[in-house]
Image (cartoon, rainbow, N blue to C red):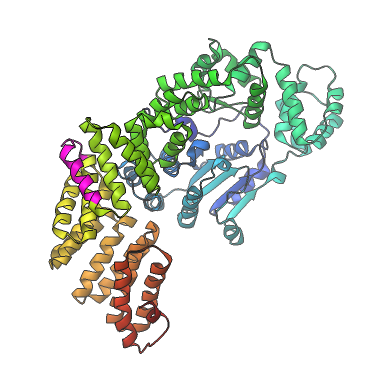
């Protein structure tokens, strides 16, 4: 499977030599660089991307560019591309974040973003990150990622969002109120009368009279796409004033009318090429040859480019193109209504070429669009393990959900990976059905069965069935290959957590030692930090406090500021309290609580608040202790935490209440 990073998504579109310069707008963009965000928001066809590209070419800025598409709605894919865009600016940038994303068990998104922000803060020069076509993003967690980045980005970073609609979930009102955002809107982007004249007469060489230019400006209201369509339609006509007089109506009808004018005026072979290739998000000569079953696509693409006929080059070498979004949408509508073309056959041809070139995600998209279910299932099976390891769960689930049930059910490996994706997104019962189906179909194939049992054990423990999880994990261990360190590490992690929950610390310790060994072999740092933290907690249970503290410090050194280190800070804080090192204990607990807030794990947060309350009481701060413990109680009330956590909170409530003379209310009620 080819690297899923498409380099054409990381390049600003090249500017055409003939371009209407817009110095007033580029000056406004310059003025916003001291803020956090520039928002360029307008409907399709107003020149948003061209304006930003023009501005960046004229400056001396370090620019990371990312053109988004529908496939980027997977949070892990989005993060991967975000990092890849920043690495275009500085090749060695983001080593820590890249390592996390490529680890066999990637940490939570905010862990990766924290590492990214920390590295950005060390970059001395200003970096501009551009997210183009952000309106295609509709996944709430990605908007949360971007909000986190906006809230924490260092002063030398600036974010530019190009979109057709305001991004939901971003703190636009707050940024606007604080003067940290510059906005370029539809009214700003409309061509003025002078800009219309420059475009029509200088760029398009139409030699129109001032009254004709004014008429077009009024009818299009400065809408750049409408002007471009009108200009292409007028080329080669004798009666231009007559055409302009007939050109009227709302932008929607103007667009339909002009598309018809542009399309109908093309030679038959160009019309056929446009319709057949309209299914493609990206076009190259070789791909277009495969879809059209012709051999002259290179020539046609160059002709379309030179004719300004709504193809946008995606790289400096003009190897890859895309159609203008509006043009593509209307070509696809026309394709669906045409009688001479089979859309399914076109998607099938595209899928075959893309798969042969290693572009599996795109090949899968076209196979699904062609309703070629068996082929799509085969391609998904080739990609699913890598998608799971990259954490691109939403993309994988969307593919699998698009398949008919029978295309999945007779493939045990695909059922296993479906079960993993469902488990890792919290859909535990649905996952178990696929995992049981996979287990039944894989009997007799120990290599496959072992990996299925690993997934089942993980799922059973997540559902709270520790007894069956342990039984299933032991079966997996008995048949897994010794060389499969990733699977053996995962099953050992499941055993360690299950035994810990059951209070069997001896077996838990053995399992976590196995996790540590396997994690070092497979490079799974996240699993190793988890194993070392639990090993430290087990040493504390045995009364080996200095060994426990040593393991916690090892985790902190290994993980730095990343949120997975939070439990180690909290455990070390508890140990320091035992040695009456209250100041150091409080510091570690505060760090642990802050980091645990990024993980969203209420159990870790509750443990941190409860332990900090005990430390504050020991420092003679009963009011602060009571307030802190109330936070632990509130977490226990608002989240599903274990009964043991509630009991521990209550055990702290009573003595604190007695010390400050509390007889009712507040934390006392929680006890």
Front-lying residue, 481 or 644: 644
**Magenta span main SS:** helix
Front-lying residue, 475 or 322: 475
Residue 419 screen position, x and y as percent: 36, 40
| Lateral position of residue 201 relative to residue 366, left or right | right
The image quadrant of residue 387 is top left
| Lateral position of residue 119 relative to residue 550, left or right | right
The image quadrant of residue 436 is top left
Residue 203 screen position, x and y as percent: 70, 27
Farthest bottom residue?
661
- Residue displayed at 42% across by 29% down: 406
Total marks in image: 0
Residue 120 screen position, x and y as percent: 41, 50
| Lateral position of residue 374 relative to residue 133, left or right | left
Which quadrant would the N terminus be assigned to in this image? top left
Is residue 621 visible in the rendered structure shown here? no
- Where 582 sits versus 407, above or below? below
- Residue displayed at 39% across by 53% down: 114
Which quadrant would the C terminus be assigned to in this image? bottom left
- Residue displayed at 26% across by 46% down: 457
Farthest front residue?
440
| Lateral position of residue 535 relative to residue 325, left or right | left
| Residue range highlighted in magenta | 468-485
Is residue 537 visible in the rendered structure shown here? yes
Q: Is residue 73 magenta?
A: no
Front-lying residue, 170 or 420: 420
- Where 658 sits versus 373, above or below? below
Residue 310 screen position, x and y as percent: 64, 26
């Amino acid at each position: 499977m080819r690297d899923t990073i498409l380099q054409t998504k990381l390049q600003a579109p090249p500017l055409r030599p003939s371009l209407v310069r817009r110095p007033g707008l580029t000056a406004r963009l310059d003025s916003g660089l001291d803020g956090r965000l520039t928002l360029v928001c307008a409907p399709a066809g107003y020149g948003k991307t061209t304006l930003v590209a023009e501005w960046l070419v004229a400056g001396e800025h370090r620019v990371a560019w990312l053109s988004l598409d529908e496939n980027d709605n997977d949070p892990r894919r989005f993060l991967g591309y975000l990092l890849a865009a920043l690495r275009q600016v500085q090749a060695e940038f983001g080593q820590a974040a890249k390592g996390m994303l490529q680890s066999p068990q990637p940490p939570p998104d905010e862990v990766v973003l924290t590492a990214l922000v920390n590295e950005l803060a060390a970059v001395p020069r200003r970096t501009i990150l551009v997210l183009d076509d952000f309106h295609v993003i509709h996944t709430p967690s990605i908007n949360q990622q971007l909000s986190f980045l906006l809230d924490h980005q260092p002063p030398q970073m600036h974010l530019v969002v190009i979109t057709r609609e305001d991004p939901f979930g971003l703190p636009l009102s707050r940024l606007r109120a604080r003067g940290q955002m510059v906005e370029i809107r539809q009214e700003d982007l409309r061509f003025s009368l002078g800009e219309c004249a420059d475009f029509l007469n200088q760029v398009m060489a139409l030699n129109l009279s001032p009254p004709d230019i004014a008429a077009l400006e009024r009818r299009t209201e400065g809408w750049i796409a409408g002007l471009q369509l009108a200009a292409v339609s007028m080329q080669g006509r004798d009666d231009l004033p007559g055409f302009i007089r007939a050109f009227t109506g709302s932008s929607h009808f103007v667009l339909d009318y002009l598309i018809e004018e542009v399309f109908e005026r093309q030679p038959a072979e160009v019309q056929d090429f446009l319709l057949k290739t309209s299914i493609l998000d990206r076009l190259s000569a070789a791909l277009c040859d495969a879809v059209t079953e012709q051999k002259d696509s290179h020539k046609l693409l160059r002709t379309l480019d030179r004719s300004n006929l709504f193809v946008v080059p995606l790289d400096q070498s003009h190897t890859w193109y895309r159609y203008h979004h509006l043009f593509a949408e209307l070509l696809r509508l026309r394709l669906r209504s045409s009688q001479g073309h089979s859309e399914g056959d076109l998607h099938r041809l595209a899928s075959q070429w893309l798969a042969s070139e290693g572009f599996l995600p795109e090949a899968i998209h076209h196979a699904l669009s062609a309703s070629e279910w068996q082929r799509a299932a085969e391609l998904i099976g080739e990609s699913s393990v890598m998608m799971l390891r990259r954490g691109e769960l939403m993309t994988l689930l969307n593919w699998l959900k698009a398949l008919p049930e029978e295309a999945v059910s007779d493939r045990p490996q695909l059922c296993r990976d479906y079960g993993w994706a469902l488990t890792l997104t919290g859909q535990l019962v649905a996952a178990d059905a696929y995992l049981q189906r996979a287990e039944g179909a894989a009997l007799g194939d120990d290599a496959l069965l072992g990996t299925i049992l690993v997934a089942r054990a993980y799922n059973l423990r997540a559902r709270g069935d520790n007894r069956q999880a342990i039984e299933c994990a032991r079966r997996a261990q008995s048949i897994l290959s010794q060389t499969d360190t990733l699977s053996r590490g995962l099953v050992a992690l499941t055993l360690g957590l299950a035994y810990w929950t059951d209070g069997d610390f001896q077996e838990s310790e053995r399992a976590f030692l196995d996790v540590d060994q396997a994690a070092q072999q497979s490079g799974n740092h996240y699993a190793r930090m988890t194993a070392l933290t639990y090993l430290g907690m087990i040493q504390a249970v045995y009364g080996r406090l200095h060994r426990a503290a040593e393991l916690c410090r090892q985790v902190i050194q290994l993980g730095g500021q990343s949120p997975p280190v939070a439990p180690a800070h909290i455990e070390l804080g508890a140990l320091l309290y035992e040695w009456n090192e209250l100041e150091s204990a409080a510091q570690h607990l505060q760090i642990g609580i802050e980091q645990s807030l990024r993980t969203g794990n209420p159990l870790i947060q509750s443990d941190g608040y409860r332990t900090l309350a005990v430390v504050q009481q020991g420092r003679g701060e009963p009011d602060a202790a009571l307030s802190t413990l109330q936070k632990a109680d509130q977490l226990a009330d608002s989240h599903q935490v274990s009964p043991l956590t509630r009991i521990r909170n209550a055990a702290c409530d009573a003595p604190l209440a007695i010390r400050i003379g509390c007889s009712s209310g507040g934390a006392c009620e929680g006890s």
